[in-house]
Amino acid sequence: MTDLNKIEVRRTFAIISHPDAGKTTLTEKLLWFGGAIQVAGEVRGRKAARHATSDWMELEKQRGISVTSSVMQFPYREHMINLLDTPGHDDFSEDTYRTLTAVDSAVMVIDSVNGVETQTIKLLNVCRMRDTPIITFINKLDRESRAPIELLDEIESTLGMECAPMTWPIGMGKTFRGVYSLVNDSILFFDPRAEKGTSETIQGIDNPRLDTLIGHQAEELRIDIELVRGASHSFDKVRYLSGKQTPVFFGSAVNNFGVQSLLDAVVDLSPPPQSRKTATREIAANEPKFSGFVFKIQANMDPKHRDRIAFLRVCSGRFERGMKIKQVATGKMLSVNNAITFMAQDRTTMDEAFSGDIIGIPNHGTIKLGDTFTESENLKFIGIPSFA
């Protein structure tokens, strides 16, 4: 595969949500559907240490929240997915804001019981500043929740984005039976006991099998869908890519339901690595020379060592192990022999990275947040918030 193709197949996105909307669960399930972990909720099947893979710091283990935005890379459908987990809790928002500068798109998780909440609004406004494309996942449909049309209205009025429903729920809570895909006219039936949350898929809303399976709910669904098609926006890729419209999926992450459709949407709809502005010029993702910026510095990633890792987003070119890169702020050349890629806590030394990838550079306090690295050119990436 050429370097250009390697850039085109990359998808770098973050998940944003209010605390407890189910973001960490969704992260887990995406990793599981992507084959990156064997069992959601446990990294290597160690019964005693079943902490969600992305919530790896001690503080997170105690509080059950994602404190550090960690980075997880995994292949899916011949694409390379870079998933950045962001803290949902208010007191960690600086970290989240910076992380959102390092992605090309985002997935917004909304709790179907509580709707749009304060932290979601804040995070969405950060995405707004850069017109980041957003896919919405309305979660927890297995609970008694608010009417889907009400949730879409709330997203449109509170967040000021058009909603384009891609799937539509059949019932909710105890009567939740699955979702109808408005894109390909198919119905996925929900079964919490089925391995991937889906017991059966049938084609066509007029399929008599639908009536056999869900009785009177079938007719209700047909009426709903007619209304939805008439009253809501249909998906417009240009509006989505410019941050003006969000495609909406419904599901229940804890039951694996709707997660695969979401992951497919990330591959099919969301953009590959985009160009980035510097103080002097715009850098295209497919430029041959390496450049990147540091959006986060994390200490204590390894309990056995006192280390600091600088997280760098590759913006152009190709990074190779051992290459010398220039820290523009100091003018010094750095030889990077031990850059790492992440699977949350599990790190592996990486040999190469491309636009859109996140690499970790071990350092002893010499790298600062917002630092730009290049092969030689004096560039300064802009738009990385500093809260110093």
Image: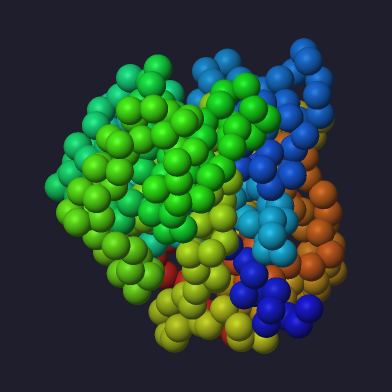
Residue located at (74% from left, 37% from top): 37
Q: Is 219 rendered above or below residue 353? A: above
- Residue 330: quadrant of the picture: bottom right
Instruction: Tell me, yes or no, if residue 227 can be seen here.
Output: yes
> Is 176 situated left or right of 263 in this image?
left
Residue located at (18% from left, 44% from top): 153
- Residue 40: quadrant of the picture: top right
Q: Nearer the viewer, residue 172 or 268?
A: 172
Q: Is 27 rendered above or below residue 112? A: below
Q: Position of residue 273 (x, y in %)?
A: 55, 71
Residue located at (45% from left, 41% from top): 208
Q: Position of residue 200 (x, y in %)?
A: 59, 37
Residue located at (45% from left, 46% from top): 207
Give the colour scheme of this rendering: rainbow
Instruction: Tell me, yes or no, if residue 137 can be seen here.
Output: no
Q: Nearer the viewer, residue 242 or 257?
A: 257
Give the residue at the far left of this rendering: 157
Q: Position of residue 239 (x, y in %)?
A: 30, 69
Q: Position of residue 385 (x, y in %)?
A: 39, 56
> Is 313 situated left or right of 227 in this image?
right
Q: Which quadrant: the N terminus?
A: bottom right
> Is 88 situated left or right of 245 in this image?
right
Q: Is 51 rendered above or below residue 379? A: above
Give the residue at the far front of this rendering: 208
Total numbered circles:
0
Q: Nearer the viewer, residue 176 or 109?
A: 176
